[in-house]
Image (spheres, rainbow, N blue to C red):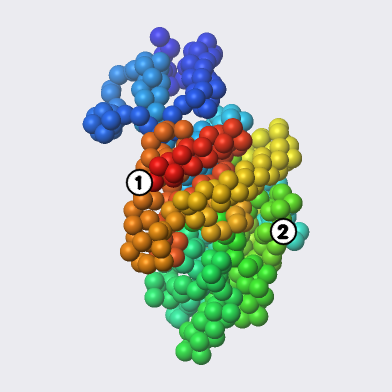
Amino acid sequence: MHPFPLEPDRATMTEMGRLVLDRVIDRTENLAARPASGTLSPQAETELVRSFLTPPPARSGDLEALLARLDDAADCALETAGPGHLAYIPGSGLYSAALAEFYNRAVNRYGGLASVAPALAALEESVIRWMAEEVCGLPEGSGGLLTSGGSMATFSATVAARHHRLGEDLAGGTVYTSAFAHHSVAKAARLAGVPAARIRTVPHTPDLRMDPEAAAAMIRADRDAGLRPFLLVATAGTTDTGTVDPLPQLADLARGEGLWFHVDAAYGGFFRLTRRGEKRLAGIEEADSITLDPHKTLFMPFGTGALVVRDPAALHAAHDGTGSYLQDMTAAGSVPDSGRLGPELTHEIRGLRAWLPLHLHGVDAFREALDEKLDLAEHIHEVLSGVAELEVPQQPDLSTVVFSVRPADDSEAAARQADETGRRLLERINSHRRVVLSSTVVDHRYTLRVCVVSHRTHHDRITEALDIITAEARRG
Ligand SMILES: *Cc1c(COP(=O)(O)O)cnc(C)c1O
């Protein structure tokens, strides 16, 4: 027995690593065959959940047995890494990113201040600049911060906008967004000190996009009433329907009215790597700040978000802080301290998990994978549009297709009945366990959605999904 059990020797480390790697590779190789959702009975699930609520033992355990338990826990879940996950906004988790993260966690370099690990900080900065300039089209000199997800990115953007436009006095500060904005937008505003009553929901046009004229009218009315409009948040790819707000008009409005313009592109942003996405996201390059979610459309593991900003100094001014215990830290020169750009100080070198896959596979591999998702969404739209029992109202802007059950007539009662049929339809589709779809509400109608984001979802699985949806819709 090694005298220090927390420091395994080389042979032990190798054996431990092999046990983990074997399981991970088995699971990954079998993803296409695995059920798209958990198969335990509710009672078995309750028991399993309870078995994991126990505290750790005083004495050592057996790694193989612990990994077997972990597999049970991981099986009791939506198969979010698999090709059948078409619910919410999928995040598939690249194998190469997991390996990068293993390396990252093992060397455990400090990511809060650039001078502690300057070359790794530069590596992270290169990923951020790529996202800001190449992905989003912001000018040179833009920058940002990698975050744990889109919600944190939008939070920091809101704090920066508030600090830049309102200063210390928040009174009367008012935010504008739409009914289809992600709930993290209103949450960020409230956390940033904006009362819920000062968060305006701008009406949308029939194609579900924020109405710039309505936004202009609201902003002017609020200003006339003595309020201080300071932030306009558009969405580039709504979570509900994947719709892109009219970014050029909203950018003009924000500029004309002196508002900070934030674009929530947590879902849609990386589609700008494709030709179609670049067209559909035109205007995003006018934003002051943009939320991206690499753990969605860059196929990174969960816990990887990003905020890119036109003026990193504004982000810095809102989040800077220090203490005398940091007096030994020298400034790192050209690379900013991420701990001074957001609420977090100590964290891992977040950029590594994106840097390794981007350099290993090349950007084109991501571009092509995203282009494939756009093709698949167009195909889904075309096939479902031919199913008489369904209504497929929107041509997809990105990779989300929404549909609902067609009501028997125009009456409210028929719509409610169709909604009820839609609920049962979702259950029946998902009960095959080959795909998982989710639902939402669009203009008071129960709406099913297919969201294709996983790098593992290809034409074969979509064909299977369409066969299941079509057969179940015809059964009524
Ligand atoms: C997922 C999502 C968010 C929230 O991001 P998290 O990473 O879950 O915090 C925000 N906005 C949009 C449009 C999203 O799709």
Q: Is residue 201 above or below residue 3?
A: below
Pinpoint residue 127: horizontal percent, then vertical percent: 67, 46
According to the picture, the residue beneath numbered tag 2 turns out to be 279
Q: Nearer the viewer, residue 5 or 62?
A: 62
**Category of crowding for the residue at label 1, using alpha-carbon neighbours closer than 10 angstroms: few (below 14), some (14–19), many (at least 20):** some
Q: Position of residue 148 (x, y in %)?
A: 51, 47
Q: Is disc 2 placed on a helix, strand or loop?
A: helix
- Is 95 displayed left or right of 367 in the figure? left
Of the two numbered discs 2 and 1 in the rendering, the one whose residue sits closer to the viewer: 1
Does the residue tagged 2 have its C-beta within 8 Å of any atom of ligand 1? no
Tell me, yes or no, whether the two marked residues, 2 and 1, touch with CB atoms within 8 Å. no
* Residue in view at x 44 percent, y 44 percent: 474
Disc 2 from disc 1: Cα separation:
37 Å
The image quadrant that residue 77 belongs to is top left
Closest to the observer, 170 or 460: 460
Above or below, 98 relative to 261: above
Identify the mark nearer the N-term, 2 or 1: 2
* Residue 356 screen position, x and y as percent: 66, 35
Circle 1 — which element? helix
- Which residue is tagged 1? 424
Q: Height in image: 345 above or below 230? A: above
Q: Residue at x 46, y 39 (%)?
A: 471
Instruction: Tell me which amino acid carries mark 1.
Output: Arg
Q: Quadrant of residue 54?
A: top left
Amino acid on which the number 2 mark rests in the picture: Lys
Looking at the picture, how far across and down is residue 405, in whole percent?
Answer: 43, 53
